[in-house]
């Protein structure tokens, strides 16, 4: 199989950002997001992941490494990803107020989402080239979208059945994520 | 949901779930919990006097500069003095800067409150997180690898697993669910 396809599939299933690296879980449990909103949120997160990976890769190679500012890497990545997230809201506002309102209604999904920041650190750590970074970020974003969509679908059905107490709900949702994680890992084992 | 339940909800979701990946051993879980408390206290001491004086997004920007600087210092310190711990926490150390529990707690500070009292009150919540993370780490290490603190407990061979599913990523979710269930039962009593 082509190496780019393998990188994409790895990021999508085997090393899924949520179910393997366990990043960006808290917003899943924190909000009772609607199915349509989850689709929009997942798409926005995927787009932000790709943009932030591209921009941080370029800035690191063009400025930070040549100028010897490697020790400021953490500060630079955190601030640049935050700014991309922050200005994405205003960018989206030009096209749809419904999409930009997601940033206000579900801030944990964007501003402090470990998956968004973690994807940049993961790709840097792997030492991928520019094209592979884009493909990996796309795979991670798509993986996040798929997991979010499946999780919210299941969560809506469970919540619809009966009213659960807080800890019962949290425990059930964590078990659901655990089962999804087993399924995603076994997809790759059979590939 | 009443007020207390709401706070506990946030405590568990914001404090524990972001670092669920580090519960593969007691040392990692407890180590990261301690770093979380350290980052909170130091960011609080520097950030709280400025809280309410700056507008968004400058306020969040200043807070992120602060937490990211502390995370960078911790990263370099661990890499220098505890290289093993630094390599285990390699992805999560930079992410300390955007830990939602730290950001949420510092941003919900009311300037009329006493700063030291506020930091001490919230440090207790971080200690509960540390305790829950450590218990999860201990359970995963014992059931998953048959070891505790890297010492043989149930099996002597460090390369084998007692239960791979518990030690692998799905196990983190399942054991955390179990710990929360026990926490809930104990709270009811």
Image (cartoon, coloured by chain):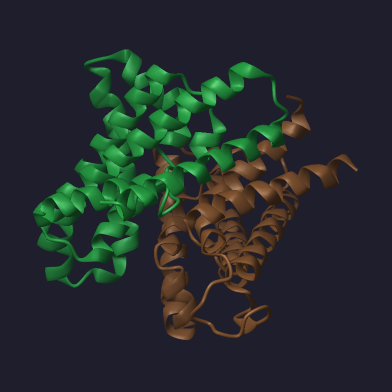
Q: Viewer-proximal residue, A50 or B141? A: B141
Residue A22: x and y in percent read 45, 51
Residue A73, image quadrant? bottom left
Q: Residue at horizontal 28%, vertical 54%?
A: A120
- Residue B49: tell me if it is visible: no
Residue B74 vertical placement versus B102 (above, below): below
- Furthest residue to the front? A190
Residue A28 vertical placement versus B134 (above, below): above
Q: Viewer-proximal residue, A59 or B150? A: B150
- The mark tally for this picture is 0
Residue A185: x and y in percent read 38, 51
Q: Residue at horizontal 41%, vertical 54%?
A: A21
Q: In which quarter of the image is the C terminus of chain B?
A: top right
**Looking at the colours in the rendered structure, which chain would you say is drawn in brown?**
B
Q: Residue at horizontal 47%, vertical 71%?
A: B74
Residue A69: x and y in percent read 23, 69
Q: In which quarter of the image is the N terminus of chain B?
A: top right
- Residue B145: tell me if it is visible: yes
Residue B79, image quadrant? bottom left
**Looking at the colours in the rendered structure, which chain would you say is drawn in green?**
A
Residue B25: x and y in percent read 58, 69
């Amino acid at each position: 199989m082509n190496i780019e396809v393998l990188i994409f599939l790895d990021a999508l299933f085997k090393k899924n950002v949520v179910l393997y690296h366990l990043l960006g879980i808290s917003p899943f449990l924190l909000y009772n997001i609607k199915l349509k909103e989850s689709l929009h949120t997942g798409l926005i997160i995927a787009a932000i992941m790709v943009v932030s990976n591209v921009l941080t890769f370029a800035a690191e190679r063009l400025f930070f490494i040549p100028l010897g500012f490697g020790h400021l890497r953490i500060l630079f990545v955190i601030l640049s990803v935050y700014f991309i997230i922050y200005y994405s809201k205003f960018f989206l506002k030009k096209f749809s107020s419904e999409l930009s309102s997601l940033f206000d209604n579900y801030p944990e999904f964007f501003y402090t989402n470990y998956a968004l920041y973690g994807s940049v650190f993961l790709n840097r750590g792997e030492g991928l080239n520019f094209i592979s970074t884009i493909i990996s970020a796309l795979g991670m974003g798509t993986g996040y979208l798929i997991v979010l969509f499946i999780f919210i679908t299941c969560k809506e059905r469970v919540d619809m059945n009966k009213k659960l107490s807080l800890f019962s709900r949290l425990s059930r949702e964590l078990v659901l994520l655990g089962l999804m994680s087993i399924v995603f890992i076994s997809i790759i084992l059979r590939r | 949901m009443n007020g207390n339940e709401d706070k506990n909800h946030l405590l568990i979701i914001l404090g524990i779930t972001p670092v669920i990946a580090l519960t593969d051993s007691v040392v990692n879980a407890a180590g990261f919990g301690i770093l979380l408390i350290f980052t909170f206290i130091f960011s609080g001491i520097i950030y709280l006097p400025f809280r309410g004086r700056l507008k968004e997004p400058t306020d969040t920007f200043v807070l992120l500069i602060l937490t990211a600087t502390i995370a960078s210092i911790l990263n370099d310190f661990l890499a220098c003095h505890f290289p093993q711990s630094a390599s285990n926490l390699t992805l999560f150390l930079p992410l300390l800067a955007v830990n939602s529990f730290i950001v949420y707690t510092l941003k919900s500070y009311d300037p009329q409150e006493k700063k030291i009292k506020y930091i001490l009150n919230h440090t207790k919540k971080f200690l509960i997180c540390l305790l829950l993370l450590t218990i999860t780490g201990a359970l995963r290490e014992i059931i998953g690898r048959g070891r505790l603190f890297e010492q043989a407990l149930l099996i002597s061979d460090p390369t084998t697993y007692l239960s791979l599913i518990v030690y692998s990523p799905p196990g983190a979710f399942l054991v955390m669910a179990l710990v929360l269930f026990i926490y809930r039962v104990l709270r009811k009593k």
